[in-house]
Structures are given as C-alpha cells and as structure tokens.
Amino acid sequence: MKYCSNYDKPVELLIPKDDDRPRYACHACGIVHYQNPKQVVGCIPKWENKILLCRRDIEPRKGKWTLPAGYLENGETVKDSAMRETFEETGR
Ligand SMILES: [Zn+2]
C-alpha cells in the first residue's frame, strides 16, 4: 500500500498507539489501513447421508475437490454469505 484511499496521500508504515505490529497509516486523515485476512465462509452440504463436494473449475487447484466457499461480502452475515456462495458455486 502506497497511498491512502481517502485522500490519495502517501501512507507511512508505523506501529499505531495500542498496537503491536506495523500498519499503514495516513497522516492526512489519521486512518490506519488494516490489512487483515479476508474472511472465507462456506458450508458442508449433506444430501442423503452423504457430504457433497464441488470440483474446482478454476485455478488455483483446478480439478481438485473442495467445499463451496468464498469471501464474505461487506454487510453480509456469515450464514447469508455461506448460502450465497453455495448457490453461486453449485447453481442450486
Ligand atoms: Zn488518509
């Protein structure tokens, strides 16, 4: 990260007060731009006493078996996200 998304000013890598690791911060607006892992949600679908899996159709790991899952969207509950990702990835 080089620039603040709020003011298009350069950010600085520093350890904010009450934190223990370096973060990108903007002196112009005072925002700390946290770069945490994206939350991935999914489900374990059961059907007739079996667990259903998806076969990946895209890279990475194309052709490998997986569970339907994906990134949580802003403002979405974990349950709604798991249902949406399952529908998107299975078409059901
Ligand atoms: Zn800023």
Image: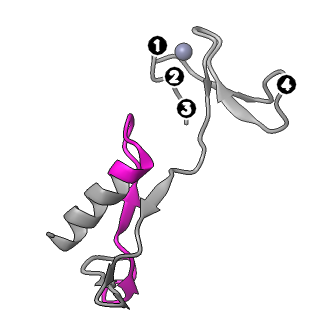
In terms of sequence position, does the residue under pointer 3 or pointer 4 come before the other?
A: 3
Q: Amino acid at mark 3?
A: Lys
Mark 4, other Cα within 10 Å: few <14 / some 14–19 / many ≥20: few
Q: Are marks 2 and 1 in contact (CB under 8 Å)?
A: yes
Q: Are marks 1 and 4 in contact (CB under 8 Å)?
A: no
Question: Distance of mark 1 from mark 4, alpha carbons?
Answer: 24 Å
Is residue 69 shown in magenta? Answer: yes
- Tell whether circle 2 marks a residue whose Cβ is less than 8 angstroms from ligand 1: yes
Q: Find numbered disc 4 in the image and state the secondary structure of the residue it sits on.
A: loop
Tell me where residue 43 appears, x and y as whole percent: 40, 68
| Residue of label 1 | 7
| Residue of label 4 | 18
Q: Which is closer to the viewer, label 2 or label 3?
A: 2
Looking at the rendering, the stretch of residues picked out in magenta corresponds to 60-80
Q: Amino acid at mark 1?
A: Tyr
Q: Amino acid at mark 2?
A: Cys
Tell me where residue 37 appears, x and y as whole percent: 57, 51
Question: Distance of mark 2 from mark 4, alpha carbons?
Answer: 21 Å
| Position of 44 relative to 16 (above/below) | below
| Position of 8 relative to 13 (above/below) | above
| Position of 47 relative to 25 (above/below) | below
Q: Which is closer to the viewer, label 2 or label 4?
A: 4
Q: Nearer the viewer, residue 15 or 71?
A: 71
Q: Quadrant of residue 23?
A: top right
Q: Amino acid at mark 4?
A: Asp
> Residue at point 46% right, 16% down?
6
Question: Distance of mark 3 from mark 4, alpha carbons?
Answer: 23 Å
Position of residue 35 in the picture relative to residue 65 (left or right): right
